[in-house]
Amino acid sequence: MTTLADAGLFTYVLGLADDALVSAQRMGWWISRAPQLEEDVALANIGLDQLGQARTLLAYAGQVEGAGRSEDDLAYLRDEREFRNVWLVERAQTDFGVAMARLLVFSAWQRELYAALASSSDATLAGVAGKAVKEVAYHLDHASHWVVRLGDGTEESHARMQAALDAEWPYVAELFEPVDAALVAEGVAVDPVALKPAVLTVVEEVVAEATLTVPQVAPAVGGGRRGLHTEEMGYLLAEMQHLARSHPGAAW
Amino acid sequence: MREWPLWEVFVRSRRGLSHVHVGSLHAPDAEMALRNARDLYTRRQEGVSLWVVPAAEIVASTPDQGAAFFDPADDKVYRHPTFYDVPEGVEHL
């Protein structure tokens, strides 16, 4: 039987899992499309790190829910409204500058989140976070280097990097939306609001080094944590889930 | 698009061993070369330390120098330390 407390934990874990899963799917798009083979591999590695985080978290979510759903059931057989990821990660990222701007924000947020979550009172979350924090520290390093090189590069790369940052910035605020207060009080969940100063400091330092400007834009509406998504989410799910849904139970 | 320069990659697999050449890659500069090397050559725990060197900075012997460079060593067997009697019981020489 699922208690109310379990339902809160299920939703919280699902949010973290879906952020990682959807970001991994977007990262996978870059394989064979990056500027060089070396960058293909780097982005594939990053996507696979995120996928690994998503798998462990989804498996745990299924366990918490207690309805017998596996990580694959949760990844492939849920509909759009059941996904709990933020809008930052779900929109298409077919511009390299956008991909790096987004990875900068996302990995800076994930690093602070996982660093704090590593001392969660929930042993599974603490374990996942303790392992993942090293992975996302590298993602942040990779994104930072590219943002600095493109921002402080040629006139064209500077303009395009600034445009990419401007495009991603409205979606930053959603990362810091409050979560279940009871879970925070129990020391299970990390309060996203508390992460904001540290995350923004990291990102803004990179932006300054890249000779770019922190965008002054209104936040997007958001709603991913409540299952409300952008139009692009449907296309992403169609591609990600197509095989598993067309051939139920298919295996290698 | 302008090609990124080529870098040679050396990996030290364990503490105490030398760095060994493992391959090459393209990168816009040294820092990115090091990161690309990490992603391409140490993804299966192959190493604990990495060197990247601009391929253009490596001075190499050429095949047509082979005769003068290497052949004269052919008949100098006395250069191999095989003419000593090792006393019994010596484990580390």
Image (spheres, rainbow, N blue to C red):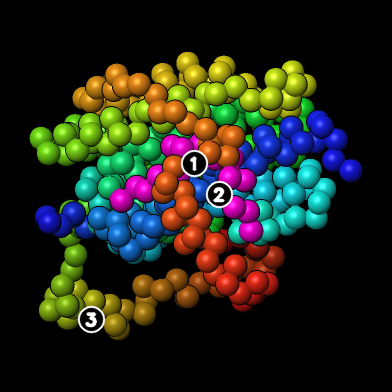
Place of residue B77 in the rendered image (x, y in percent of width and height, measured from the top left) = 36, 80
Q: Quadrant of residue B78?
A: bottom left
Q: Chain of mark 2?
A: A
Asked if the residue under mark 2 is in contact with the one under mark 1, i.e. CB atoms within 8 Å, the reply is yes
Mark sitting on residue A229: 1
The Cα–Cα distance between marks 3 and 2, rounded to whole angstroms, is 71 Å
Q: Quadrant of residue A167?
A: top left
Magenta residues, dominant SS class: loop
Q: Nearer the viewer, mark 1 or mark 3?
A: 1
Residue in the image at 69% along x and 25% along y: A180
Is residue B30 in view from this perspective? no
Q: Nearer the viewer, residue A143 or B59?
A: A143
Residue identifier under label 3: B71
Asked if the residue under mark 2 is in contact with the one under mark 3, i.e. CB atoms within 8 Å, the reply is no
Left-right relation of A1 to A158: right
Identity of the amino acid at label 2? Glu
Residue in the image at 61% along x and 74% along y: A247
Q: Which residues are magenta?
A: A77-94
Mark sitting on residue A80: 2
